[in-house]
Amino acid sequence: MKALLLLGSAPVILLAAPAAAQTMDHSKMPGMTMPAKPTPEPVPEASEQPTAPAVSQDSASAPDAPDCPPEHAQMGHCTPKPTADPHAGHAMPGADQATSPMDMSGTALPAGNAPAPQPPSDHYADRQFPPEEMAEARRQMMFEQGGQPFYQVMFNLAEYQAREGADGFRWDGEGWFGGDINRLVVKTEGSGAFGEGVDDAEIQALYSRAIGPYFNLQAGIRYDFEPNPSRTYATVGFEGLAPYWFEVEGALFLSDKGDVLGRLEGYYDQRITQRLILQPRAELNLAAQDVPENGIGSGLSDIELGLRLRYEVARQFAPYVGVSWDRKLGDTADFARAAGENPSSTSFVFGIRTWF
């Protein structure tokens, strides 16, 4: 029975042991004497907190602490390092003080819709060097970089024509001299038959003026050597590069006899390779009235369609072969039949396209 009581009271004894240990006075144990706990001083109210002591002459001459928080400086533990005023010695202009022109620039300008001030000069170098010398240097630079005159002579057609009856020949060329805007242009074209001479030949002298990046307006005179009787025409036309890289030109002609003629032609260079080029070409001639003495009828007088394949041995020299079909229409065809000529012909051609 006593053994059962001891076993039942063991858990109670074990639970009570820690509580007893917590209430034990350790100060009575040898070597465990604890110092007396200091009594905390009462915290003064905000109005009763002591102010920072006045800095004496000696402390003022002491070196400033490199790191002095404000709370430590208030209790007199250190002296804060004075900070330099970035505006010290600079008087800030008041509302009634006038500002210098350098201040009234950029973002300092008042808001508004006033135009921007004019730059002092278009050319900064004029500030350092005599303006007359710099103007001459700029003029020379513009002359060398595109203002100087150039020239070119090109024969787009210079060919032999093999056809039924007498074989023939044909040429179509142009040369110009001038700059990018103003040029003097000379054009010539014609055709004929071997053994029979030249059937038609003309030359034009034109003033050419650029009216855009790709087109020129041209005006001048045209003179026909053949057919007889010869004619002189006042000429106005255009020449340029149309969209999709079509070379086109057109002109109106007013003769000294009052005859009005027109012409429209164009071609396109289709590159097969970098050197092999196929060129389709078309030319149409028109007349406002009949000119029987020259075998020209009113309306669309004749048309020429050609297809030429050339090989550029060099950019300036390209032999070619092809085919050309010529047809006279309307009254012009009637005049040709009356003269014993065939109004239509097909020719196999070979020639040279060259420029320099």
Image: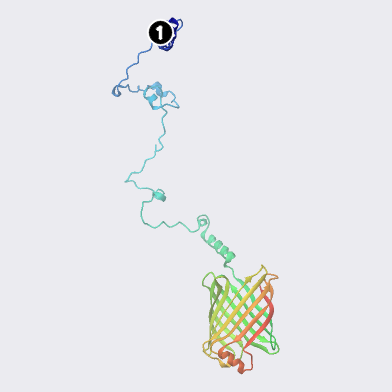
Q: Quadrant of residue 199?
A: bottom right
Which residue is farthest bottom?
A: 338
Amino acid on which the number 1 mark rests in the picture: Asp
Image side of residue 214 versus residue 315, left or right: left
Instruction: Locate the C terminus by quadrant.
Output: bottom right
Above or below, 282 against 197 in this view is above
The image position of residue 283, as x and y in percent, is: 59, 81
- Which secondary structure, mark 1? loop
Instruction: Locate the N terminus by quadrant.
Output: top left
Above or below, 125 against 14 in this view is below
Q: Residue at x 61, y 80 (%)?
A: 305
Above or below, 1 against 253 in this view is above
Q: Quadrant of residue 159?
A: bottom right
The image position of residue 116, as x and y in percent, is: 41, 56
Above or below, 227 against 95 in this view is below
Q: Nearer the viewer, residue 7 or 30?
A: 7
Q: Nearer the viewer, residue 256 or 214?
A: 214
The image position of residue 55, as x and y in percent, is: 37, 23
Q: Residue at x 41, y 27 (%)?
A: 69
The image position of residue 345, as x and y in percent, is: 64, 86
Which residue is farthest left?
A: 47
Local crowd size for mark 1, using a 10 Å CA cut-off: few (<14), some (14–19), many (≥20): few
Q: Residue at x 30, y 24 (%)?
A: 46
Which residue, given by chain and number where applicable, does mark 1 sit on? 25
Counting the numbered discs, the total is 1
Image side of residue 162 versus residue 213, left or right: right
Image color mode: rainbow
